[in-house]
Each structure stands twice: as structure tokens, then as C-alpha cells.
């Protein structure tokens, strides 16, 4: 959520950020919030004046009775009662008004970092660096769907029978690779990168998704439970970011305990409502997939360095797997709703002759922390306790299992239909090469 003071006191600044995002419709929401905030200010002023008058009159009433001026006292009591009734009406209006303002504010995207490049969509993203050289094949490389089918390890026909489109069944070596990748990613992040592993619920109440920015704007991209959970509307998680970032919701952390660095494996569930027709076949874009997620909670001053480290933590995994990739900074028009700044890491996909995103590493500023009331208390200054400040949050894929499996099957495929197993996975897989079954 944008700082309410910035939103109401610097609306043109907010609109300038929306213009960079090419989000013209949201400008009218800013105007509505400004108008509502002005009304709120007037209500608060009138209410406070009435409260002050009530206090003054209440003190005077007793004196009037003592001095025998009962008629004046009764008239003053009537004024107090009338004022109390007006205060109640103002507070009811204020409550409704504040809920409306918050509802509007929750639909506005984050302000952008000054370094975010201008641009409208993914074609305007800026390549920061590349690693590895895409392999030159002396045969026509196949897509992972065909590679997996020849190996007998990917089955999309039977999964359709079970659940419909955008699901898959991993068999034998694919299931082992799925598990091996999860272990490899978690072991690297916990043993080498200093993360604390957490295992979190895969169902969250709506407030958790509001906290990280999925709700209310992207409700159509989530799977909602048909029945309330513990009396609350609940959803399957679209990413472990949601429960992990909310671990410290409504808490005040100590600066000495920051940064907090969590890593979590989870299945992810997405309706993909905004991607109709894209990547329907295969593992690229599914309703259910596995992912390892990294989450940081930091001070504002530490966020830039933390963001750079977060990106490196994801890149190290691709380097270890020897998968060519590039890192791009997203332009303003392609930066996600909640992100302040974002770098995507894209792995080379031979069958498509292009790079595809496998990790999105974002810093959110205090956007999420404000929504979930996540704060920290700075260290004392000259022995004086400091007021709590909002934390900054970051997260990144580290990494998605399905898309990395796609990259492995395509980059390591051989002409005879076999697939060489990346060296770092061989001990976990128990084999060096995946071979098609004998006819």
C-alpha cells in the first residue's frame, strides 16, 4: 500500500508513477481518494470540535445545578445530547469513509524505484548480464513435451483425464528430478546462503493475500475455497511468498534481528486467468506447480544490497546447473503490481530459441509491510527508544521446479532421445543419463 500521506498530499507524484506504468485508469482512483480524504479531514475536525464542546458543557452543567440554574443546565444537557448524536453520526460516516479509502488504496500499484527504466512491456526490459552460451545442436532440438514423452516421464494426456488442461503427471525420472531439484535448491540456500527453511500452510485466509498484494486486485488468478476456513474466506496459495511474508504480520521486530531470510518449498496454485491461450501444453504455465521461494525482511537502508544478493542467490543455482541465462531489469510497464523494482532471470529454451523467465526477484519497499502492519524498532539513539518503522520486504523464486526441468530436458537432450543429467544432480538422481525405454 502506498504511504497514505504521499497518496493524499502528493497525488501528482503518484499519478506520474502510474503514467510510467501506463496505468491511466488508476489516476481516477487517486482523485477519488484525495476527495474522500478531504471529506474525512472535515469530518474529523467537526467531530473533534463537538467532543471539545461536550467536555466543556459537561463540566459547566454541574455548576449550573449547584447555583440553582436548573433551566440553563437542562438546556445545556439537551445540547450535549444533540452533540453526542451528531458525533455518533459522524463516526459512522467516518468508519464507512475510511473503509472506502482503504478499498481504493488497495487497488493502486506500488511506486517505482527511480532506476526502473521506462517502457511499456517485456520488449522494453533491459538486459543486465548474460551467463553461459546457448548450445548449438547438430540436430533439431525438441520441446520438453516431446523429450519427456520419448523418455516416458511426462504424461499430459492422462493428467488431462484427471484434472483437465494445465496439469501434468511426472513419472519415474521426472518425479525424481522434481524431488532432487527441491533438495538441491533448499540445501544451497540454507547451507551456503544463510536462509532459514520454513514449511508453511498451503491454504491462507484472505487477509494474508491482501498483505502481499494478491488481493483484491488479482482475485481472479487465485483458487478460492468453496467454504470458509475457520470462519474466513480462504485461498490456495499462488506462491509461498504469501504465507512466508505474512509470518511476521502485525509484529514489531527488533532491528538487531534483521535481516530475516526465509526459504520455503511449496506447491503453488494459479488459475492463470490472465494468460488464456499461453503455454497450454507442458510445464511452463500450469495450474499447479512446485517452487522454492526466498523471502527477505529488511530495513530500508539494507534493501538495495539485499536485492542484489537475492538475485545472485537465484543465479548461482542456474550456474551450478550449467543452464545459460540472462538477467533483465523490468521496465516500468512490465513491473508487477506490488514491486518497487524487479529483476527477472530468464533461462535459455532451445525449442523456442529464446530466454524464458524462471525467477522474478522483487523489492517491494514498504508496500507489503504497510498492508500487513509489519514493522521494526530501530536501535536506540543516545539511549532513547525509537518509534517503530515499516520494514521493507523482498522475494524471489529460487527456483521454480517445472520451468527448470523444462530447461534441463531441452538443453541437455541428445539426438538419440536421451538426456544428460546435470552433474550437480547426479548423486541425487542416482544416474548420469536418462534414456528412452527400449522398444
Image (cartoon, rainbow, N blue to C red):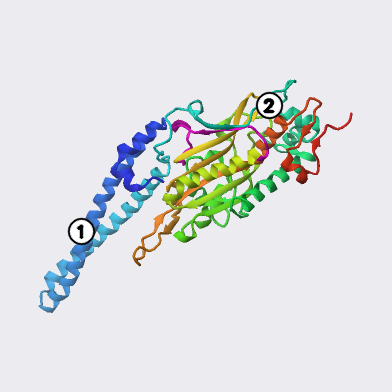
Residue displayed at 45% across by 27% down: 120
Whether 75 is among the magenta residues is: no
Whether 329 is among the magenta residues is: yes
Crowding at mark 2 (Cα within 10 Å: few <14, some 14-19, many 20+): few
Residue displayed at 44% across by 33% down: 332
Q: Position of residue 392 (x, y in %)?
A: 45, 50
Q: Which mark is first along the chain, 2 or 1?
A: 1
The disc placed on residue 135 is 2
Secondary structure category for the residue under label 1: helix
Q: Position of residue 51 (x, y in %)?
A: 23, 62
Q: Quadrant of the C terminus?
A: top right
**Is residue 422 toward the left or the right of residue 357 in the image?**
right
Label 1, label 2: how far apart the Cα atoms are: 75 Å
Instruction: Say if residue 214 shows up in the picture.
Output: no
**Is residue 190 toward the left or the right of residue 143 in the image?**
left
Q: Which residue is mark 1?
A: 49
Magenta residue span = 320-339
Residue lying farthest to the bottom in this orientation: 66
- Give the number of the mark in front: 1 or 2: 2
Amino acid at each position: 500500500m502506498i504511504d497514505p500521506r504521499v497518496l493524499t498530499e502528493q497525488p501528482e507524484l503518484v499519478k506520474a508513477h502510474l503514467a510510467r506504468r501506463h496505468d491511466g485508469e488508476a489516476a481516477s482512483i487517486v482523485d477519488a481518494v484525495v476527495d474522500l480524504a478531504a471529506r474525512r479531514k472535515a469530518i474529523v475536525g467537526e467531530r473533534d470540535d463537538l467532543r471539545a464542546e461536550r467536555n466543556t458543557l459537561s463540566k459547566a452543567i454541574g455548576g449550573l445545578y449547584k447555583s440553582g440554574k436548573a433551566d440553563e443546565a437542562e438546556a445545556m444537557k439537551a445540547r450535549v445530547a444533540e452533540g453526542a448524536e451528531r458525533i455518533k453520526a459522524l463516526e459512522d460516516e467516518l468508519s464507512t469513509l475510511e473503509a472506502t479509502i482503504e478499498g481504493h488504496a488497495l487497488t493502486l500499484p506500488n511506486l517505482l524505484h527511480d532506476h526502473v527504466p521506462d517502457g511499456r512491456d517485456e520488449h522494453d526490459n533491459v538486459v543486465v548480464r548474460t551467463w553461459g552460451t546457448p548450445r548449438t545442436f547438430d540436430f533439431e532440438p525438441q520441446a520438453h513435451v516431446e523429450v519427456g514423452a520419448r523418455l516416458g516421464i511426462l504424461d499430459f494426456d492422462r493428467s488431462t483425464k484427471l484434472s483437465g488442461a494445465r496439469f501434468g503427471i511426472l513419472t519415474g525420472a521426472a518425479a525424481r528430478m522434481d524431488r532432487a531439484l527441491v533438495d538441491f535448491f533448499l540445501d544451497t540456500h540454507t547451507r551456503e546462503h544463510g536462509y532459514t527453511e520454513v514449511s508453511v500452510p498451503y491454504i491462507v485466509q484472505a487477509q494474508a493475500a491482501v498483505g502481499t498484494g494478491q488481493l483484491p486486485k488479482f482475485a481472479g488468478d487465485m483458487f478460492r475455497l468453496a467454504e470458509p476456513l475457520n470462519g474466513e474466506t480462504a485461498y490456495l496459495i499462488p506462491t509461498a511468498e504469501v504465507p512466508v511474508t505474512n509470518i511476521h504480520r502485525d509484529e514489531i521486530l527488533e532491528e538487531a534481528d534483521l535481516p530475516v531470510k526465509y526459504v520455503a518449498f511449496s506447491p503453488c496454485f494459479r488459475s492463470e486467468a490472465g494468460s488464456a491461450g499461453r503455454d497450454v501444453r507442458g510445464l511452463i504455465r500450469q495450474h499447479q506447480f512446485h517452487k522454492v521461494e526466498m523471502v527477505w525482511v529488511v530495513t530500508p537502508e539494507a534493501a538495495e544490497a539485499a536485492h542484489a544478493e537475492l538475485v545472485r542467490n537465484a543465479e548461482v543455482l542456474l550456474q551450478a546447473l550449467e543452464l545459460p541465462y540472462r538477467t533483465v531489469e523490468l521496465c516500468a510497464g512490465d513491473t508487477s503490481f506490488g514491486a518497487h523494482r524487479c529483476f527477472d532471470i530468464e533461462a535459455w529454451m532451445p525449442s523456442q530459441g529464446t530466454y524464458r523467465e524462471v525467477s522474478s526477484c522483487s523489492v517491494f519497499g514498504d508496500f507489503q509491510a504497510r498492508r500487513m502492519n509489519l514493522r521494526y524498532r530501530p536501535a536506540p539513539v543516545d539511549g532513547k527508544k525509537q518509534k517503530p518503522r515499516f520494514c521493507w520486504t523482498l522475494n524471489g523464486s529460487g527456483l521454480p521446479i517445472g520451468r527448470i526441468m523444462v530447461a534441463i530436458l531441452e538443453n541437455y537432450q541428445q539426438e538419440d532421445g536421451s538426456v544428460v543429467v546435470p552433474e550437480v544432480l547426479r548423486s541425487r538422481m542416482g544416474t548420469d543419463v536418462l534414456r528412452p525405454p527400449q522398444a
